[in-house]
Amino acid sequence: MKKTGILGVVLWSSLAFIIGAVIASFVASREIVYLETNQIVIPDVSPQFPLLYFFCAVVVIGVVLFLIPLSKLKWVFRIMFVLLYAWGIFVVLALVIPSLIAVGILAIAGGLTWLFVPRVWLHNVLMLIALSGVAAVFGILIDPWPLMGVLLVIAIYDFLAVRFGYMMWMAKKLSQSDALPAFVIPKTQSNWNRSFGKGGFQTLVEGEAAEREYSILGGGDIGFPLMLMISVSAVYGFVSSVIVAAFSLVGLIGAFLIQRFLVKGKPVPGIPPISVMSLIGLLIVHFAMN
């Protein structure tokens, strides 16, 4: 079957971002109504906390992958993903379905389905739901400018991690555990229903980039700009959040274009162009619209 090429990858990535923005905005709006109705005060969260948590997680995961054989970690990572996906489903549905028992059953069923039926499309759907839930929950806790600072710091890390090979080393290690915190975008339609059972994730990062049947989009490339969008919405309003999200999407598309035309298929950090464009959008919102 004919491959979709860079255009197809860009379209699918853009669609994932847009759908994630819709889900996160919906959940955040319901969350804010719930907090106001129950007179719950939103706590102030220091930007140092998510930044410290992010880098601690990076260091811990790297040390664990280096020191402990993957044969002993495989099920640990897979169970972590089941819990992440179940949590994402629970967050998205808890404010829609009145029965928390029903929501819990659906959440657990969704996570376990990924464990036993690891299809490409299901992995992407559950990853998007989980990241949208994370963005909705934590986006309203941090103000836009501190969160923008966090995003810029992570952009520097992302650039250095890709430049010195740490990101690809970690991706290869995680793929061997049949768990990868990224979106998997097939270059042919038939591969959307492909199973990742028996080491299927490992094939994603093997061989030359041009010869692979999939493109990989890091979860952070979607999750962080969605979180910023929700933060902007809480402070500046919905229209302003749409503008910032649009600039973030331009940065995401720019990362693919850089990979395709400038570095000829080599790994490209997505957060730097996303953060730069997000900053431009936030500056426009702050100075021109408020």
Image: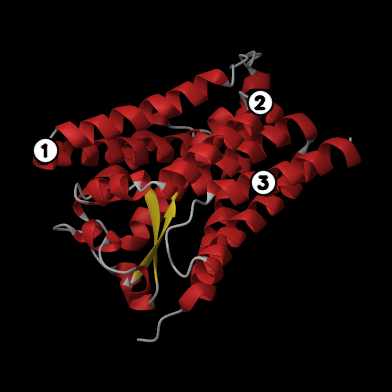
Q: Amino acid at mark 1?
A: Pro
Q: Which residue is mark 2?
A: 146
Badge 1 marks a residue whose secondary structure is loop
Question: Of the residues tagged 2 and 3, which is closer to the observer?
Answer: 3
First-in-chain label (2 vs 1) = 1
Residue depicted at x 42% and y 48%: 162
Q: Amino acid at mark 2?
A: Pro
Residue depicted at x 71% and y 41%: 279
Residue depicted at x 78% and y 36%: 237
Residue 69's disc number: 1
Badge 3 marks a residue whose secondary structure is helix
Residue 111 screen position, x and y as percent = 29, 43
Vertical position of residue 262 compared to residue 103: above or below = below
Crowding at label 3, few (<14), some or many (≥20) Cα neighbours within 10 Å? some
Q: Amino acid at mark 3?
A: Val
Would residue 97 be visible to someone looking at this image? no
Crowding at label 1, few (<14), some or many (≥20) Cα neighbours within 10 Å? few
Vertical position of residue 41 compared to residue 286: above or below = above
Q: Which residue is mark 3?
A: 276
Q: Is residue 111 left or right of residue 228?
A: left
Residue 281 screen position, x and y as percent = 76, 46
Badge 2 marks a residue whose secondary structure is helix
Q: Is residue 78 left or right of residue 216?
A: left
Quarter that holds the N terminus: bottom left
Would residue 66 be visible to someone looking at this image? yes
**Viewer-proximal residue among 71 and 29:** 71
Q: Is residue 181 left or right of residue 258?
A: left
Contact check, label 2 and label 1, Cβ < 8 Å: no
First-in-chain label (3 vs 1) = 1
